Image (cartoon, grey):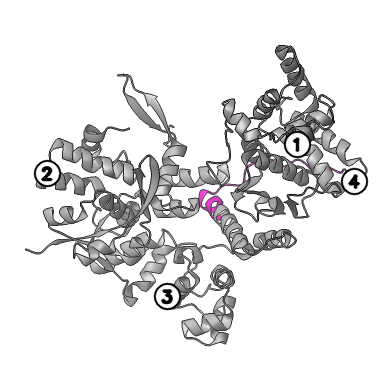
Amino acid sequence: MAGQERPGSDSDGGPLGARLRTAREARGLTQAQAAAELQVSRPLLIAMEKGSRQVQPEELIKLARLYDRPVSDLLRPTEPPVAIGARFRAALASAPETDNLPDLIARLEELADNYLDLLRRAGAEPPGQYPPVRRIDHLDSAQAGEDLASEERNRLSIGDGPIQRLREVLEIDVGLRIFIEPLPSRVAGLFVYVEPLGGCIALNANHPSERRRWTLAHEYAHFLVSRDRAEVTLVTHRRQVPESERFADSFAANFLMPRSGLSRRFNELKRSKAGPITAAALVQLAHAYRVSVQALTLRLEDLRLVRAGTWDRLRDHNFQPRAAARMLGLEADDEYAAESLPFHYCILATQLYADGEITEGQLARYLGTDIVGARRVYQRLTETRDVSDDGASQIVDLAEAVG
Amino acid sequence: MQRRQILLDACVAINLAATDSLDGIANSLHLAILIAQQAAAETGHLRDVINGELVLTPIDLSQFALGDDLQVLELAPSEFALYLELAAIVDDGEAATIAMAIERSLEIATDDRKARRLCEERHLAEPVRTLALLHSYAETAQLSDDQVRELLTKVRDRASFQPPRADPDLKWWNDHVGSA
């Protein structure tokens, strides 16, 4: 077991002790309770967690069962990323409806731990090159949001049209780690920055894809101007919002729907209709930009391309954007539905499995599913259908080495 | 006649459970099928399509254990240290399976590349694969081509199994269910 800690070895304590402590706390057990279950004294359990007492094999197996953790997780050779959990905990402390907070924190901490473990196994670094932190404290929030969105579009070379693969751009080109998890219903998303993972964004899996897209752009704005403060974005209808939120919303609107590109498209649409802009045209335009009809209409109001109050009038007439989109055959293409995990995380896991570096059971654990589920994800991520020379369908394994 | 003891990992157990013929396979091939408790706990669900809906069907190995077609094994205290040593390299199920195979001199069945390599490093006999078991079963039970196709289709669709390219029975698989 080269390079690994093992129970009974002299080098116990660091990772194993810390992981035992973290697992116990995540299970909501006190040291006294865990010690009683293990039938040892509390000081002995404390000594195991501190590393001053070797953990015997049968004790570790019992503790893993008690904490409902695989022993292989407890034996990871690195310290658990408790700092990441603490940042998420601090960020979510102000959020309402926090009944399931411990479970959520544990899940986010586990995902971060898995990500770091995958990077360790692959000998890889997290992708992306972060831009320097921008200073906006002397600027008007709305203007700062617009200016920064324009700068970022230029920096990322994405022109002024709709961004088709926003998540890919922010994960691969920028290097953010984006997780999609069920969050408390009033929490749209949150951002934390913590080494060694860097910028981490969690989006609410229960929100519609257009809403998640907006939240993602909003959290990205926070990342661009502040790396030392965790941010939670709440769903709110308040008119008075903090300046930092006004800035992030302005950035999101301008980043997703830049003034020049949206104006051009809107005017083209207007010309082609040869008449007043209809609700159907708004639905089409919203679909093109992958934003909600509400966000699109409010943006057009801001740009004075439609009359102020247009969205309020639509809403008063019981306009149903989703039903309208369905009638027009414009179902939302949910770019986030497939994967709750970051792309790079999934690529690392599948490549390690393809290379025979992890087992199918480990792949399943990293992907948060069972073995058959992991097979299905692996096949989806690595196989592409092609046609062979004789015209028959064949599957090409994209994870297979070619050089 | 003594039955041939074979220790399945979770992956092979899933594949055999998907056939709905685990008992038939055990009887035809005169096998005593064994599985470590940790591996049994990792088997999860099969995927079935019922009335167009994808349904998760739990794999319940206890039904086979009750019928004596399968035996779920617990680690012995003397195997704990080796189990933990292996659990630092592979998942709990593979670690328990390989530890038991080493300590009890049992034959292993696994398709998992990492597990097979670990078996080789630990000087275990080359593990048997899912398709080798199914091929032997098809021949011993004299299944028709249609029956073989049905058997393999269940493994492909319910367990989402795709044999690795190194599998010696890959052609037999492709001849019956193709690569689709």
Q: Is residue A299 magenta?
A: no
Which circle's residue, 4 or 1, is located before the other in the chain? Answer: 4
Residue at left 78%, top 54%? A228
Magenta residue check for A119? yes
Q: Residue furthest left?
A: B1
Q: Which mark is residue B139?
A: 2
> Vertical placement of A119 versus A47: above or below?
above
**Chain ID for label 2?**
B
Q: Quadrant of the N terminus of chain A?
A: bottom left
Parent chain of label 3: A
At 61% from the left edge and 63% from the top edge, which residue is drawn?
A100
> Which label sits on residue B127?
none
Q: Nearer the viewer, residue A383 or B117?
A: A383
Q: Which residues are magenta?
A: A117-137
Q: Is residue B120 above or below residue A168?
A: below
- Please tell me the numbered disc located at residue A57: 3
Which residue type does callout 4 highlight? Asp
Q: Whole-Å distance between the Cαs marked 3 and 2? A: 45 Å
For the question of whether residue B27 can be seen, the reply is: yes
Task: Locate the C terminus of chain A by quadrant.
Answer: top left
User: Compared to B32, does A324 lie above or below?
Assistant: above
Please tell me how crowded label 1 is: few (under 14), some (14-19), or many (20+) other residues with Cα within 10 Å.
few
Position of residue B43 measured from the top left corner of the image (x, y, whole percent): 35, 57
Q: Nearer the viewer, mark 4 or mark 1?
A: 1
Helix, strand or loop at label 3? It is helix
Residue under label 4, please give it: A137
Name the residue that disc number 1 marks: A316
Pinpoint residue B153: horizontal percent, then vertical percent.
Answer: 26, 40
Q: For the residues carrying marks 2 and 1, which lies nearer the camera in this image?
A: 1
Label 3 neighbour load within 10 Å: few <14, some 14-19, many 20+: many
Disc nearest the viewer among 3 and 4: 4
User: What's under tag 3, amino acid-wise?
Assistant: Pro
